Image: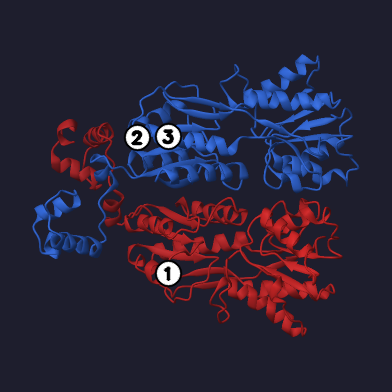
Chain colours: A blue, B red
Amino acid sequence: MAQLAGVSVTTVSRVINDYPHVSKAKKDKVFWAMDKLGYVPMQAARQMRGSGSQTIGVVVPEIINPFFSYLINAIERTVDKLHYKTLIIQTFGRKQNELTALDYLKRHQVDGIILCALENDWDIIKGYQKYGQIAVCNEYVDEDTIPMVIGDQFNGLRQGTEYLISKGKTKIAYCTGRDSLLLQQRGKNFDSDRYLGFTTALQAHDLSFNPAWLFTNAHSIEDGQAILKQLSQMAQKPDAIITGSDEVATGIVSLAKSLNIQIPQDLSVLGVDDQPLAKFLSYPLTTIRQPITQMGQQVAEVLIDNIKGTTEPAQKIKLDLQIVPRESA
Amino acid sequence: MAQLAGVSVTTVSRVINDYPHVSKAKKDKVFWAMDKLGYVPMQAARQMRGSGSQTIGVVVPEIINPFFSYLINAIERTVDKLHYKTLIIQTFGRKQNELTALDYLKRHQVDGIILCALENDWDIIKGYQKYGQIAVCNEYVDEDTIPMVIGDQFNGLRQGTEYLISKGKTKIAYCTGRDSLLLQQRGKNFDSDRYLGFTTALQAHDLSFNPAWLFTNAHSIEDGQAILKQLSQMAQKPDAIITGSDEVATGIVSLAKSLNIQIPQDLSVLGVDDQPLAKFLSYPLTTIRQPITQMGQQVAEVLIDNIKGTTEPAQKIKLDLQIVPRESA
């Protein structure tokens, strides 16, 4: 590069490292040669001088789920105001994709990472904290050193269940997106907290849960349709269902008419998320709204504060969910 | 690093550059020291040895629009099979965000970029072709050296308009997401092609277009609601509307009942995209389906072929749109 620019190696080094006292003419020559050779000073080199990549990574399971696309939107609009750029990475539930994202941190291509998915064991993720800031959003992490912004799943589901009971429903089915339900102490685990909220409300009204009404792996509109078909053939039918997502709720209400099931009289359907289209469906969805915008804003602010060197203990922020009553329940 | 690993500088260099004939014991020492120091061989260095980042960048306007989240999904699922990783970047319509994405190409942090948004002039984007492969998806590009995969907007909108006319509609309103309509020769411009398809169908039936029925900046559900309010106060009312997106169509049908407008008798509403929820709305949307999955697959395959060194002239692929008749028109 020095040869091409017609300057000394020292001058090239000074320009790249942004030292003072280099003439504009020499700088221009070096920049011209850099461009010619396709050379850009490495992020890592800049990082060592403390300027950083001014970029954060956001890791989500998949963006076709509007919960995550709107969460990313809230995060990116916040970091944008703080002059940071955003890279988005999908895991599709795979450990390797999450490690790829964490490698961007290791290579200093991002200054921080917001994990809205947790695929690897925390012991593995922790190993990357030495390369930059990590914050977790939506998922629960039982670890003192990591900031976390979550929705209060326990109380959200407890209130949703109370709402159904207040409408006279006593036989409530329950769906989860996972392939199993791992029950833990309250506050340790997203899915466990949802289920504990549900069963706490049942117990308060001396109601019991029929294990035949537990549906796992429920994600999509098609899953919801399959669940309603199963329900319609049961001898003991539930009179309400907590779906875990508006997609599943949409699938259930979409087939109700053709299966001769009246919504909400025969079956109340409770969604989760309050997607933008939830209120425009043939049966507008009663749903548990998640505080997506607040979650995104707050986790972004916490992460950037930490990148800038705030040394407070890692914050744990819990935000309220809210019942949105419409026609489906 | 050599000091920490207890090996010679030459050995470190050999390990980093993946030379043969280095003992496993020495390699392990160097890898341990690399990890200790947070050092990762630079992408650019690897690139010079020809291995590449095995990563592509996908640039879209914004992922909360399901058209783009599903397009990314199709792209990522395809490149994944070809053992490439994906980084997603949103432009929000800004030139600078697109340049940031193109800089990843310049720094060899990605091997190729798929632009599903075009913010900068093509002359600027072209300057980045020397750093890696660029392909365009959904947007039109009038440039021989660039592969492009688009939907046939002209024929899609022509057929959509023909469909409305076949249902007896003659006074058709038209919405665009842009703040103006730049008309060009057919095949040069996405929005122009849509509008030319619309007016070509009108002309074939000796129908004219009332300029009062052109709505610009129409993106969201709220925009659709505002348009219906305007329409309802017009002395001369259209009997059909081409909305440009399912969001705008959703907004229009959502207010119809309260404004005493019968869908489709008083007003036929034609969406574009066929979003997953379009068929579950209170008035299931008649819409023009875009070939999202095919577009994503094909542009991903073309880009990876080019990264791997296929030297055929840049392909131009045009895919058919399809009318999906439901209740709103």
In space, the residues marked 2 and 1 are separated at their CA atoms by 35 Å
Residue A54: give its label: none
Mark 2 lies on residue? A308
Residue A250's x, y, as percent? 75, 44
Specify the farthest residue to the right.
Answer: A260
Amino acid carrying label 3: it is: Leu
Residue A303: give its label: 3
In space, the residues marked 2 and 3 are separated at their CA atoms by 9 Å
Is residue B3 visible from the viewing direction of this image?
yes
Residue B59's x, y, as percent? 48, 57
Residue B121: give its label: 1
Q: Quadrant of residue A156?
A: top right
* Circles 2, 1 touching at the beta carbon (< 8 Å): no
Element assignment for label 1: loop
Q: How crowded is mark 2: few (under 14 residues within 10 Å), some or many (20 or more)?
A: few
Count of marks overlaid on the render: 3
From the viewer's side, name the closer residue of A197 and A82.
A82
Q: Residues within 10 Å of mark 3 (few under 14, many from 20)?
A: many
Element assignment for label 3: helix
In space, the residues marked 3 and 1 are separated at their CA atoms by 35 Å
Question: In screen coordinates, is B24 left or right of A159?
Answer: left
* B81 versus A169 height, above or below: below
From the viewer's side, name the closer residue of A233 and A12.
A12
* B64 versus A34 height, above or below: above
Judging from the image, mark 3 belongs to the subunit labelled A
Residue B149's x, y, as percent? 54, 68
Q: Residues within 10 Å of mark 1 (few under 14, many from 20)?
A: few
Quadrant where the image shows the N terminus of chain A: bottom left
Amino acid carrying label 2: it is: Lys
Judging from the image, mark 2 belongs to the subunit labelled A
Element assignment for label 2: loop
Amino acid carrying label 1: it is: Asp
